[in-house]
Image (cartoon, helix red, strand yellow):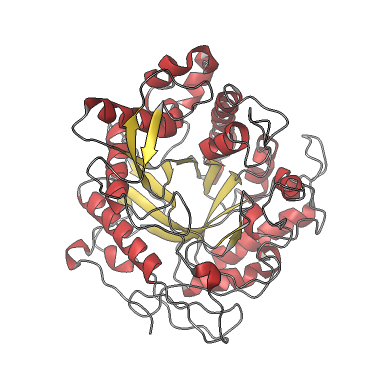
Amino acid sequence: MASQFEFDPALAGSLPADFVWGWATAAAQVEGAWDKDGKGVSIWDTFAHTAGKVKDGSTGDDAVRSYDLYATDVALLKKYRARGYRFSLSWARLIPLGGADDAVNEAGVAYYDRLIDGLLAQGITPYVTLFHWDTPQALEDRLCFERFGDRVKDWITFNEPGVYTLAGYAAGVHAPARSSFRERNAEGDSSTEPFIVAHTELVAHAYAADLYKREFKPTQKGTVMITLHGNWSEPWDAGDARDVEAAERAREFEIAWFADPLYKTGDYPASMRAQLGDRLPRFTEEESRLVLGSSEVYGMNSYSAFYVKHRDGPADINDHKGNIEQADENSEGTPRGPASDTYWLRTTPWGWGKLLRWIWARYGVPIYITENGTTAQGEHDWKPKGPDDVLEDPFRIDFFREYLTEVAKASQEGVVIKSYFAWTFTDNYTSSPSPVLLTMLLTSQHGSGLQGTRTASAPRGSISTAPRRRGMRSARRTFWGTTLTTSSRGSRHEGRKHGGEHEARR
């Protein structure tokens, strides 16, 4: 029997009628076909093919075969009543040799044409990310705007530039695998490179957004945003002013590092400058002008919350968190939330709600939730007994109910929230340091690699989950958040908190 739940009736109609429900994926994690139809090698192909980088030696060569099976994906999205689908473009599939003057791979363009057209034919809005960690993004901007901009109206320049920077250049556990830790990486400087890379990402985003607004927006009428990561930091001891300050500093190092230059001041937070000094780059006057306001809305990826404790003494040279300590329990022994199958990810709706309000209060721009979800303990061990076997999924159901309840409550209080994309639509390949992360709504039953038949965990009936293998009989499905939306509001929604109005196109 499938698990079911209902939302609090008091929350009915709390979200606008044009609220976008959907799922999110990334090319390197789902497409597969790593060397098919003229695709070049990406930095993640190189990373996964390097001995010792992935725990069991697996690669994303096949991933979950979305390149070959995209039509089935679109059909599933339609069945789940998704209004939007967020995916990324593989630069190596579009310009295999990587140079500004190198040839365009028309087979790659044709694949994304088919995917975009298939989504639009089913009434599903594409949200397209130009850089989701697998490529140097700047070279593809103009090509993508020119080739897909007549149909794609929602562009995301970078996905989680902070995670890409810290995992790739501070910890060295993601591509391109650079850090100061020589037992792990042969090259890199964790004390300087992450901040240089992040600065470059912000400036590159600003120039790409400026290009779009000047040359393409007048005719294409689209929107450009950037998607930032960030989890809530709660004081370990709420009665200790040092922990309260440390929690705010942690939020600034993780979130305001990118968000303050984009939405608030055009510069980095003072707390970062105080700790990092000249290791934190400085914007030129032109860069600051371009960066500030370059993202028209706030793209938000968030999953969990942490208790934060102040740390005595000077910060380590490689510190990037604001000289703090994170804890799973606070000073009173209260745990932050139930554990998932991912060591850092716990269910923390209390922190999620606080984060939504903090972002709105600090920046005052409409929030597009572009990733949120969880893993569940034991899902790696599930073995279907047949094509009709169902994976009961109460942990994930509870997660979505509790987090969406906080979205609805924040919306009732006036926080402008325009979308919710669950991570992720299918199983995806994750290559650091353990290879396979079974995440969110759709799961894959895989043998060697991820190329096997897929199952789908998705709402059925009221609000429930019922996975099935790709190509098997589909059960009736209803999208899990529709009871929270209302038909009484129009498509125009009050936008910037501090002046101006944001108009939704749908």
Count of marks, rendered view: 0
Asked whether 38 or 164 is in front, the reply is 164
Displayed quadrant of residue 4 = bottom left
Asked whether 311 or 455 is in front, the reply is 311
Q: How far across and how far down the image is residue 191, in percent?
A: 57, 22
Asked whether 477 or 348 is in front, the reply is 348
Image quarter of the C terminus: bottom left
Q: How far across and how far down the image is residue 406, in percent?
A: 27, 54
Residue at (41, 74) in percent of width and height = 459
Image quarter of the N terminus: bottom left
Horizontal arrangement in the rendering, residue 235 relative to residue 127 (left or right)? left
Q: How far across and how far down the image is residue 258, in percent?
A: 46, 30
Displayed quadrant of residue 248 = top left
* Vertical position of residue 440 compared to residue 103: above or below: below
Horizontal arrangement in the rendering, residue 231 relative to residue 215 (left or right)? left
Residue 454 shows in this picture? yes
Residue 122 shows in this picture? no
Q: How far across and how far down the image is residue 282, in percent?
A: 52, 15
Horizontal arrangement in the rendering, residue 74 relative to residue 479 (left or right)? right
Residue at (50, 69) in percent of width and height = 379
* Vertical position of residue 146 compared to residue 78: above or below: above
Horizontal arrangement in the rendering, residue 121 relative to residue 92 (left or right)? left
* Vertical position of residue 399 compared to residue 98: above or below: below
Residue at (43, 82) in percent of width and height = 476
Asked whether 333 or 460 is in front, the reply is 333
